[in-house]
Amino acid sequence: MKNIFILIIINLSILSCKGPTPEPGSEQIKSPDGALIIKFTDDKLEANPSITLSNNDVIAISYTIKKSLDGTRPVKMAVFVTESPETRGILLLDNVKLKDVDEQTKSLELSLPEVGVEIFRNFYIDITDSKGKISRKNVRILPTGAEQIISWSNINLGVQASNTNPRFSSATGDVYSTCDLDSNLNFVDITYANIGSPSIKPTFLSNPRRVALGLGVTVSDKICTNVSVVGGTPTFYAPINVPIEFGTVNDLFLKGIAVPTTTQDIVIEAGKIYMFQNTRITKDWKTVTRKGVIKINSINNFTSPTVGTIAAGLVNFDVKVQR
């Protein structure tokens, strides 16, 4: 009986010595085993997957997801940030449903947990496919004390009758195709159209303003039909009202401009610079207001010889916007 009692004490002692509780998210990350094809839409980010961010900045990225070579398609997405690429880290988003299609563009906008001055963080996206396997895309987050801006050059948008799409996101740099509009419409903040009759003017306008001006509530192309384009981000435009050297624009300059939040459309001219502002709520419920400037490089319109109105056309421009 005495020996049995000692054995029980030893067993209880072993059970009670579990060691320290692991830190949340410190468990080892599962290696990706899927074969989905994931690529950033920004070629610079694809070549060098790193983004410099301050604590006040928001990460905004966009990527294409293609089915694997065996035909497996994406199902859902989860997003993490970690201090070590070997650990799971902090779950930012989970069970984000993806389209059951061969190819899609997905834009993402999130604030991150506060970034330590000396710590390089890793932001990664896990996409689960229909076989339960995971494909992964990583971005290195490089901390800085200075707030950053986003720059895009040589952007082309088309008017209503053009084969070039008219909707752009200043946060991700994407000109969205018809098939991708319904899942990314909130990111659209700059659109292009010819407005007016009989005098037609090249115009920048927010996506909600398009509907208000009767430009239609659905769009179609050869692949996708009757895609809803109702909604998007209200964006306000105005002529630049301060001296500006476009190449030197930084966050401090953008922070100092005052954009009236009254007009969601503006007639534009080649060679001029315009300012804009919009506010969005990120997936993690952070309200982000961004100000930016647009430099119009060229406007090329084709006028129909039979009816005398602009039948097609492009605007080419550069953008700088707060991150």
Image: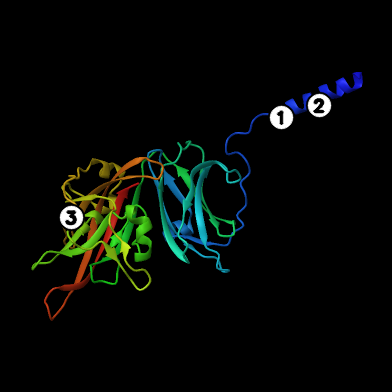
Residue 11: mark: 2
Q: Does dot 1 land on a helix, a strand or a loop?
A: loop
Q: Position of residue 272 (x, y in %)?
A: 18, 58
Front residue of 107 and 173: 107
Q: Residues within 10 Å of mark 2 (few under 14, many from 20)?
A: few
Residue 105: name its quadrant. bottom left
Q: Does dot 2 land on a helix, a strand or a loop?
A: helix
Q: Mark 3 belongs to which amino acid? A: Asp
**Which residue shows up at 38% across the image and 42% down it?**
57
Q: Position of residue 68 (x, y in %)?
A: 55, 65
**Which residue shows up at 43% across the image and 46% down it?**
52
- Judged from this view, the residue extending furthest toward the top is 2
Closer mark to the observer between disc 2 and disc 3 = 2
Residue 225: name its quadrant. bottom left
Q: Residues within 10 Å of mark 1 (few under 14, many from 20)?
A: few
Residue 172: mark: none
Q: Mark 2 belongs to which amino acid? A: Asn
Q: Position of residue 309 (x, y in %)?
A: 13, 73
Residue 265: mark: 3
Q: Mark 1 belongs to which amino acid? A: Lys
Tell me how far mark 3 sits from mark 1, CA to CA.
Answer: 64 Å
Tell me how far mark 2 sits from mark 3, CA to CA.
Answer: 75 Å
Q: Quadrant of the N terminus?
A: top right
Q: Which residue is disc 1 drawn over?
A: 18
Tell me how far mark 2 sits from mark 1, CA to CA.
Answer: 13 Å
- Precedes in sequence: disc 2 or disc 1: 2
